[in-house]
């Protein structure tokens, strides 16, 4: 029952609704005692020959009135209790979603998407059931059971009541034992569901890769194995769950047997009437529900307890990167200064960056080049404040980047990552995502700068074309250019292009870079690229190798050094000549 204490904050918040609902449940529990009593009186009057037509209609009318009142009360208590449980699900979903949006990338490296989805669906559903069906079964089993037992003892015969309740300790012991088993098995079942959820998400997201490598059969086999594990673990839960009803039915059967046996004895001794025995057995039938509810309660509560613990564990995960007290609430602007002596990604054995120092004046462009894994993207992630824990400082304008509110820092930065994510919506919606208030002309202008406007106009629905999940219907170059246009719509103080021109041809790349240079004369830009043509016109170029800046200068200065940059440039020039069908002598 610990889960009810854990949910105390919510019950206090919705105390009015729960109080009204439980009061109505109490009245229902009392009112349902009336019809069995009327039946008993009617049987006794029939036996005594005193029942009249007027008396019969009086009893029937009373039953109808009681039924109508119970109908209304049951309708409204459901609104109060189940309505509140739906509200709890809404609160938990919002808390989880807000928490997910605050977490740093390291959080998503530790937690699989399938697990997080299971928390937001199955786990919340189990907790919702606890706050609805769990509260109902707990309170109703106590009130209905309590009132029925009192009615049996006070209005009929206390001795027969005690006799009928003799088997109850058996039920209490067994249901408690079943509940402990259920808790452990349901925890394993939820973990298995998370694994299956994660596998499903990965398979759907990577369907192209699966088909390309012809691994559909193996993937189906892996999915089937996980699915079988989910079934097996849920069957283990069901085996325990299925013990509740037979156990309770057996206990109820014993109670009926004792009631009929001793009740007949009391009738023969004139200690009670036949009508009393009928009323007693009818009450005993009503008592079946509270006993069944106890079995349901253990099931609901144990599921809810496990699920709430899983949700709390996620919500209690600390936010690695948060706003400082009294953080600056204005967007940064001005020069960028990157002075990092060392930085290590969480979990890595050795530093990712060391001795990276550069200054970038407002309106200038910085080019970053280096081999894959050299540390280019790590530099950008530090500027975006996706990671902290580095030795040194990063300034944006007059303040360190951690002095600004995260949202304000990122509102000033337009970031185009290597992995371009597009939503399953229209191209227009994807473009205007970063700036929902942008006019259609502004959207079109950004698309023209990114040289994607003509491609969009060539689609059957133009800007209203649905791109499919993650932009599945677009080419790599089209997705890159849409991502660039989306970032430009922010009119960012700092634009970051993380190898974002790799999928476009050289002519388109040149056109985009020229348009960006004209558009962003007074704004700062950082470009990382493997192709040196993308950063040749940058005001400052740095060459990164194994996390260390080994060269810095303009294109001309770096060429004059005859170092790593020079070698990369010569190699790319040779590759271009070969691709064009020539040779090193231009033939």
Image: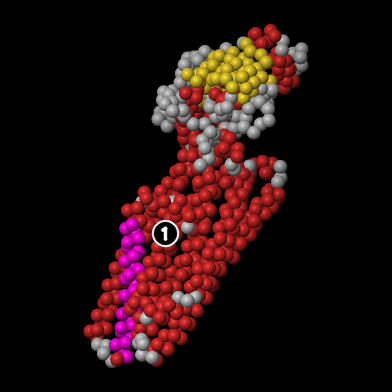
SS at badge 1: helix
Would you say residue 247 is visible in this rendering? Answer: yes
Instruction: Please rate how many residues cluster around mark 1, counting C-alpha atoms within 10 Å: few if below 14, some from 14 to 19, many from 20.
Output: many
Answer with left or right where residue 537 lies relative to residue 143.
right
- Relative to the observer, which residue lies in front, 419 or 175? 175
For the C terminus, the image quarter is top right
With 584 as the anchor, is 480 left or right in this view? left
Q: Residue at x 45, y 78 (%)?
A: 164
Q: Residue at x 46, y 70 (%)?
A: 291
Q: Is residue 200 visible?
A: no
Magenta span contains residue 29: yes
Query: Mark 1 — residue?
Result: 135
Please name whichever residue, 154 or 95, is drawn nearer the observer in this view of the structure: 154
Q: Magenta span covers which residues?
A: 19-47
Residue under the image location 37 percent in, 77 percent down: 153
Residue 29: x and y, percent?
Answer: 35, 68
- Relative to 554, does residue 131 appear above or below in the rendering? below
When the figure is inspected, residue 380 is found, relative to residue 12, above or below; the finding is above
Q: Nearer the viewer, residue 7 or 567?
A: 7
Is residue 400 in the magenta section?
no
Q: Position of residue 195 (x, y in %)?
A: 61, 49
- At 73% across and 18% down in the image, what residue appears? 571
């Amino acid at each position: 029952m610990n889960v009810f204490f854990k949910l105390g904050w919510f019950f206090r918040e919705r105390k009015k609704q729960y109080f009204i609902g439980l009061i109505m449940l109490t009245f229902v529990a009392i009112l349902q005692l009336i019809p069995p009593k009327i039946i008993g009186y009617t049987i006794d009057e029939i036996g005594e020959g005193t029942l009249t037509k007027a008396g019969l209609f009086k009893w029937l009318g009373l039953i109808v009135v009681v039924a109508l009142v119970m109908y209304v009360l049951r309708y409204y208590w459901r609104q109060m209790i189940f309505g509140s449980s739906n509200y709890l699900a809404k609160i938990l979903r919002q808390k989880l979603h807000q928490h997910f949006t605050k977490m740093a990338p390291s959080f998503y490296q530790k937690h699989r998407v399938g697990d997080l989805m299971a928390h937001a669906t199955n786990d919340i559903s189990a907790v919702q059931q606890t706050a609805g069906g769990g509260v109902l079964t707990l309170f109703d089993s106590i009130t209905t059971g309590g009132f029925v037992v009192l009615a049996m003892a006070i209005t009929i015969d206390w001795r027969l009541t005690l006799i009928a309740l003799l088997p109850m300790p058996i039920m209490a012991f067994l249901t408690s034992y079943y509940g402990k088993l259920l808790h452990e098995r349901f925890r394993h079942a939820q973990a298995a569901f998370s694994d299956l959820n994660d596998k499903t998400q990965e398979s759907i997201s990577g369907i192209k890769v699966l088909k390309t490598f012809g691994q559909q059969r193996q993937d189906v086999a892996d999915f089937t194995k996980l699915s079988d594990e989910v079934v097996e673990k849920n069957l283990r839960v069901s085996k325990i769950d299925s013990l509740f009803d037979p156990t309770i039915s057996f206990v109820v059967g014993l109670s009926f047997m004792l009631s009929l046996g001793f009740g007949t004895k009391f009738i023969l001794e004139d200690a009670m009437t036949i009508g009393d025995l009928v009323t007693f057995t009818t009450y005993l039938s009503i008592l079946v529900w509270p006993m069944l509810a106890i079995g349901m309660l253990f099931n609901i509560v144990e599921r809810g307890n496990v699920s709430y613990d899983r949700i709390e564990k996620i919500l209690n995960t600390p936010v690695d990167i948060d706003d400082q007290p009294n953080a600056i609430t204005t967007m940064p602007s001005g020069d960028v200064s990157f002075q990092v002596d060392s930085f290590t990604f969480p979990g890595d054995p050795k530093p990712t960056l060391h001795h990276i120092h550069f200054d970038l004046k407002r309106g200038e462009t910085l080019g970053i080049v280096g081999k894959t894994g050299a540390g280019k993207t790590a530099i950008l992630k530090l500027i975006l404040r996706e990671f902290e824990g580095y030795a040194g400082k990063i300034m944006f304008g007059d303040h360190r980047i951690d002095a600004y509110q995260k949202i304000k820092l990122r509102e000033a930065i337009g970031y185009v990552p290597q992995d371009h994510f597009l939503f399953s919506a229209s191209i227009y919606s994807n473009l205007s995502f970063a700036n929902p208030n942008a006019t259609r002309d502004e959207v079109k202008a950004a698309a023209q700068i990114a040289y994607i406007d003509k491609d969009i106009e060539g689609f059957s629905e133009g800007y209203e074309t649905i791109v499919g999940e993650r932009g599945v219907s677009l080419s790599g170059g089209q997705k890159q250019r849409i991502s660039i246009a989306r970032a430009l719509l922010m009119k960012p103080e700092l634009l970051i292009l993380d190898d974002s021109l790799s999928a476009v041809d050289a002519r388109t790349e040149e056109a985009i870079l020229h348009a960006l240079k004209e558009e962003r004369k007074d704004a700062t830009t950082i470009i990382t690229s493997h192709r040196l043509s993308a950063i040749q016109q940058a005001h400052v170029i740095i060459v990164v190798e194994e996390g260390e800046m080994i060269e810095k200068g303009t294109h001309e200065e770096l060429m004059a050094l005859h170092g790593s940059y020079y070698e990369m440039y010569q190699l790319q020039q040779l590759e271009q000549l070969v691709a064009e069908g020539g040779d090193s002598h231009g033939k």
